[in-house]
Structures are given as C-alpha cells and as structure tokens.
Amino acid sequence: MATQPSGSPPTTDIDLFADETLLDPYESYRTWRDAGPAVWSTRHEVWILSRFDDVKRALADNETYISGKGVGLYGPANEALEGTVIASDPPEHGALRRVLADRMSPRGIRALQPEVEAAANSLVDSIVAKGSFDAMPDLARKFPLMVMADLIGLPGDDHGSLLGWADAGFNTFGPANDRAVSSMPIVGEMFGYIASLDADPSKLREGSMGREIYEASERGELKFEQCGRLMAAYLMAGLDTTISSIANAVWLFGRNPEQWTIARSDPARIPHVYNEILRIESPVQTFRRTLTKDVQLGDALMREGDAVLLLYGSANRDERHWQDPDKFDVRRRSADHLALGFGIHNCAGQGVARLEAHSLLAALARKVERFEVGTPKRHLNNLIRNFDSLPVTLVPAAEMENA
C-alpha cells in the first residue's frame, strides 16, 4: 500500500472499521461521496471509492483493479485465501468458477427449488406458531445453514461451527484490528476441518457441491490444493451474506409495515423486493482491489500498486444514482445495485442466495400479515452488516388464523 497520496486529494481520518462507524456508516459514506470520487484514508493508507459510477467502473475493469493481491486489508487473511474464486484474476478465476458452473446455472438452481421452497414453508410455519422469537437464531441463521450445509454435503455433526467460521472469515478482511486478529485462530479451525476433508473427501455426501469440487480435481480441472480453498470461500460466502439479507428484510419490514403490505400483495414483485433489501442494506459493505496502473480520479492520482476499497454499501445509497436513496421502497427498480458485485467477480452463488430469499419471502408473504420488531442488537463485523439479536412478533395472515 502507498504511504502517502500523490497530489492534493481529499483525505479522511474516519476509521471505516471502528465500532461507531460500523454501527451506522451512512453519514460517513455521504461525507466521502461529497468529498470527491476518491478519498485517501490516512488511517489505513488506502483509497476509498464511494460513488456508484466509480465503484461500478472499478468492478467492471478487472485488469486495472485486480483481486489477486487480496480483497481485504489484513495480510495473513489475504494469504490464506490466495487462489480462491474471490481472490484471483483471469485466467485462474474463470477456471475456478467453471468447476461449479452447472450447479450455479439457472438449470442447476431450478433443480434445488422444490426442496428449498419446502424447507422455507416448514420453517415459516414453525415461527408463525411461536408468534414471538429472535429472528437471528430462529430464522436468519437457521435457514441458510440448513440449505448450505446440505448443498455442500457436510456431515450432520459438523454444522455447528459453520456460523462462527463464516463470521470470523469476514472479520479477517478488515484491517489488522482486534476483530481481524482475534478471528484468525477461528479461521485456522476452519482450515483444519477442511484439511480433514482433503484427507477423506468421502465424508462429503455423494452428489453434493463439496464432493464435486474434489471430483473436479480428480479430473484435472483444478489442483488438489485448490479444493480446500474453494471450500473455504463457499463456506463463508454462502452463509453470512444470506443471513444478513434475511435479517435485514425482517428489520426493514418491521420498521416499514406499509412496504410489507405492498410486497405481499403481489408475489411476482418478490424478486424486486429482494433487490431493494440488498440495495439499502448491503450485506457486504466493502472489498479491496489493487491497482495495476496509475489512475486519475478527480484530484486524486492513485498509483500502481495502491490498495482501493470499493464501498458497495455507499454506492447503493449514492444520491447521484438513486432518487431518495435512504428511503426503503419495494416499488423501486433496484436490479442494478452492486450488493452482489459486478463484472467477473459478481457473486458466484447469488442464484442460491436469491432462491433462498425469494422462497422465504414468498412463504412469509402468504402467512404473515405484519412484523412487530423490538430493539435489535447490532453485530459488529469488519465487512458484514448484521445483527446479534432481533426480537420479533409475527401477526399471522387471516388465512393462517383460520387454517
């Protein structure tokens, strides 16, 4: 990373990863957007891109803004994920994505639909019966864990540690703060578990996504040492991002009941509804890129080798792109949001994430008239915007009461 910027760019000493910023980052985001297209962070010696057009342009230009040098700010974590889908560049990146391309294709996602929809309906029935509950353990964490553990093919006894591993993994993408450093031993546990799968891939269910990764190695489609790193990337990315979006949906609809009335009035609207949830509360707030050449943005001359943070959460609330961006509006056409990335590094598993969320929202729309949310407790993670607890009481739909 650069030690000081060239020229006279706008600078900031606000710590993007401080507790107070993570709790509510949006005022800082607005400050940076207004300051200029590129702002220099004196704390982390990294460039910040916060406007929609600039973030999207950087994501699209994978030759100038590369991922192979790491997508976080903490060196040990970047080294651990080197060569994974998330932290690689062409041609390696394309080869890695092709391993599971059929699974993640529309046809592959359709094959999962009946089972995922059935699981969503069953879970919603159970929480409606409870009435009052904590949406984090009983809904937002429970559903993605069920789906992803089965999809990857993990033995039933091995599910318990996944949530902690995923949370720790995203923490290590931040700077070398307490959250990142204390999370590394937990990530080490995850890689220890994956090493046991390397030693005996037959532990994974036959026909599962995890088993297919190792079978691709046997066919020569990727190196054996890449299998574990691919597993790690999918274990992390497949959980916390979906957990965040489900929790945010409950929170947003609890705070905006009129939006839930609109959403549940038309099931065909649910994909648009989910896009708006992703836009206004992006699960992943930022990722890093590294420059392969000098780039001039406004008054900022960013040099080859400089690190750049792309703020998805800010871009998705940029007044230059969105009308009234801080308003949650399920009628908004939000499909061009950047919450799931853009270009070659768009989220590889977004088809599964969308299937999970759409199935759950559809089941809730049929069976829940209103969400009454209590006071939540935010969960602080260097990258993921989420909750520790989210008390909620469901008011069932009339047809459920009469069932």
Image: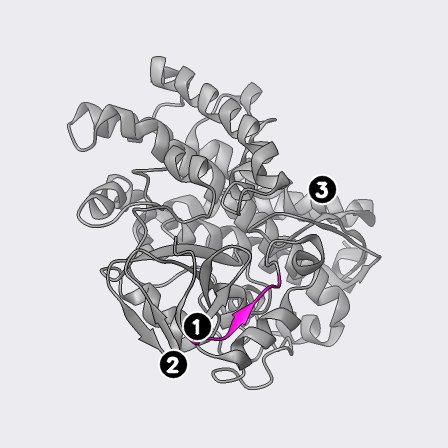
Residue occupying image coordinates x 53% and y 47%: 174
Q: Nearer the viewer, residue 101 or 379?
A: 379
Residue annotated with mark 1: 38
Mark 3 vs mark 1: give the one in front: 1
What residue span does the magenta drawing correspond to? 8-14
Which circle's residue, 3 or 1, is located before the other in the chain? 1
Q: Position of residue 239 (x, y in %)?
A: 53, 42
Distance from Cα at disc 2 to Cα at disc 3: 47 Å
Query: Horizontally, is 219 left or right of 60 in the view?
Result: left
Q: Position of residue 403 (x, y in %)?
A: 76, 53
Residue annotated with mark 3: 138
Q: Is residue 296 above or below residue 185?
A: below
Figure colour scheme: one colour
The answer to which image quadrant residue 43 occupies is: bottom right
Amino acid under disc 1? Ala
Say whether residue 10 is magenta.
Answer: yes
Chief SS of the magenta region: loop
Residue 298 is labelled as: 2
Amino acid under disc 3? Asp
Which circle's residue, 1 or 2, is located before the other in the chain? 1
Residue occupying image coordinates x 36% and y 50%: 348
Dot 3: few (<14), some (14–19), or many (≥20) neighbours within 10 Å? some
Q: Is residue 126 above or below residue 149?
A: below
Q: Nearer the viewer, residue 75 or 268?
A: 75
